[in-house]
Amino acid sequence: MTPNSSILFDNLPEGVFLLDAAGHILSYNQAACRITGYAATEIENRPFFILDEDHEDTIKFQHELNMAVQNGKWVSEGWRRRKDRTRYWAEATLSPVFAGDSKLSGFTVLLRDTTERKNRWLETKASEERFRLMVEAVKDYSIFMLDPEGYILTWNEGVQLIHGYSASELIGKHFSIFYTSADLIAEKAENELRIAQQQGIYREEGWRVKKGGSVFWASVVLTALFNDQNKLVGFSKVTRDLTSRLRDEEVLRDSEARYRSLVEQVADYGIFMLDEKGRIVSWNEGAKRIKGYAADEVIGKYFSIFYPEEDIINDKPKRELRIARAVGKYEEEGWRLRKDGTRFWANIVITAVYDQENRLSGFSKVTRDLTERKLGEQALQESSNRYRQLASELSIANDELSAANKELEQFSAIVSHDLKEPVRTVKSFLHLMARNVEQDQFQNMKTYIGKGIAAAERMEELINNLLHYSHISKSDLIKEEVKVADLFHAAIQNLNDSVEASGAKVTLQSDVDSVRGDRVQLVQLFQNLLGNALKFTRGRAPEISVQCSEENNRVRFMITDNGIGIPREKLEAVFEIFRRLHFSSEYPGTGVGLAICKKVVERHNGKIWAESVEGNGTTFFVVLPHNQ
């Protein structure tokens, strides 16, 4: 991230989190710290769902990640907990991030504290509840509201068409005005209110009285209305004139009774009916087994009693019915509540049900408990993740072993050849010297001794370089900020004799002040590269250009010479230990210098390579992380 983008990231008013592909927090901005109460880096590498009120709900969180990948983003609202455990209502927008090869690399989360807005909405919702309970004008049904004692509060056009009364004749009257004399004597109206309040709903078909005294066969639904505190606020009464369809309705009721009997016996699925407002009107054995309620405990209740608190505050039950009515069906998976308060992961299907005249008569709701299956899928996913992690670790270990084996093979070749060669030379000259001593011939002794010493010195140099190479791999890195100019001045100082002897011209151009790393090893790195550039010249004064720049938060070095160059097919081989492209008599050396350079760069998590045109110089590139 560039400095400008980092400043923008930290000053955004919303909390922003960056997650990896498994949902663990990689970083977050200052607004996220302010909202959650956690300090910078305090929750890095921890799963994002620790900010939820239920901070162990891995199933819901994995579902949200899957939905974000599937739909492009996922927006959720709900209670969350700050570090001090205080609650706040938040909106979180989860968006997937894909790499260049369309592989999921992580997620971004935009977090907003909407507690104040949600509280205002709840206050508005409470003030509008009486309006929400009002029904629109319907002509085929008489629909009116009653107060808790049964007096009429509202009226629709269907009342006048069916009962014959105008609004002014009904408002404030007791609804028993529609009952026959026998029903009034039996206090039927009062009994219906009592039953509706106890059971949530009262249904019946029977005779009712119109304004002129004539009677009609009516279908009546009396529903108790409770507010969010489950306090009775009145009743809704829906009446339909079925006089002309009485016989057809009797046949239909018989058919429905048979179907209801069949559904009630199903034990693996919770199957129940809702009225058009979402009140439960039927209950089967499977619903009792899954949710724990008996039929008399839920009939007449709004089906939101099965939903967690956050879903109710978000009006999720109402939204589901609206979608089912608009498209015919609503289906999802999510948490639902049993009677004892425990949760289960449910697959639910809500289907809008219409009568023969294509009018909505309610909804069917089918629920299946998938908790065990989800837990099994999660265990399988975790096992798969562990397997992939283990496979990755084994692959890395195998690569490391392969590299170590390759070095071991090279070492064996060195021992069998490079180290044996000076031993054989020393041994040969010792034999010659012994033979000359026996023959009293001493004229060549000084030559033999000199060559034997030279061979011994070469063997010592090979052993020292090998030990130095091994030491680089084992010694601990002591990282610090090192001035770029100091690195090159130290390297040139160590090569001062060679620079002066060759008449070399070495220039440094750097846009970077410093780099972080091990001072000793970095000096050795650039000393070897400069020494290599000084050595491989042919009859010309060396000209070496060193350039240092920064790109993408990495420091890039270019060491360019005007030497003999390297054949294209040998560019990678030059970094192999003891690999020499020329005879030592022509260009002295052991072939360890560039191998040491490669080892130093790799230990600093960088890259090194060479580009060259044979006969026209070489450029070595070194790229190191700026802050490692």
Image (cartoon, rainbow, N blue to C red):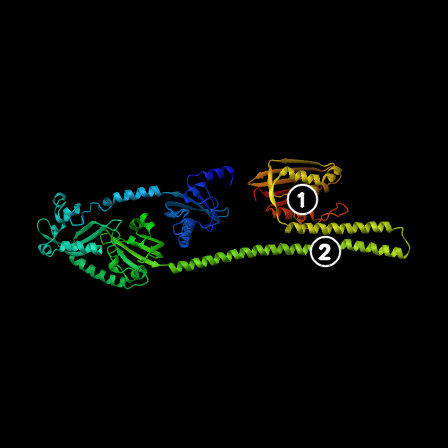
Query: Residue 416's image quarter?
Result: bottom right
Can you identify the residue that label 2 sits on?
A: 415
329 left or right of 85 in image: left
Mark positioned earlier in the residue sequence (2 or 1)? 2
Q: Amino acid at mark 2?
A: Val
Classify mark 1: helix, strand or loop. helix
- The answer to whether residue 145 is above or below residue 295 is above
* Total labels drawn: 2
* Other-residue count near label 2 (Cα within 10 Å), few / some / many at <14 / 14–19 / ≥20: few
Of residues 134 and 156, which is closer to you in this image? 134
Residue 578 seen = no
Can you identify the residue that label 1 sits on?
A: 524
Q: CA distance from mark 2 to mark 1?
A: 25 Å
465 left or right of 259 in image: right
Of residues 328 and 34, which is closer to you in this image? 34
Image location of residue 133, percent across then percent down:
23, 47
Q: Which mark is residue 100?
A: none
Q: Amino acid at mark 1?
A: Gln
Query: Residue 262's image quarter?
Result: bottom left
Q: Residue at x 90, y 56 (%)?
A: 439
Q: Residue at x 29, y 56 (%)?
A: 365
Q: Residue at x 34, y 49 (%)?
A: 310
Q: Residue at x 20, y 59 (%)?
A: 253
Image location of residue 125, percent across then percent down:
28, 44
437 left or right of 353 in image: right
Classify mark 2: helix, strand or loop. helix
* Other-residue count near label 1 (Cα within 10 Å), few / some / many at <14 / 14–19 / ≥20: some
Q: Are marks 2 and 1 in contact (CB under 8 Å)?
A: no
- Residue at the extreme right: 440
Image location of residue 298, percent across then percent down:
26, 57
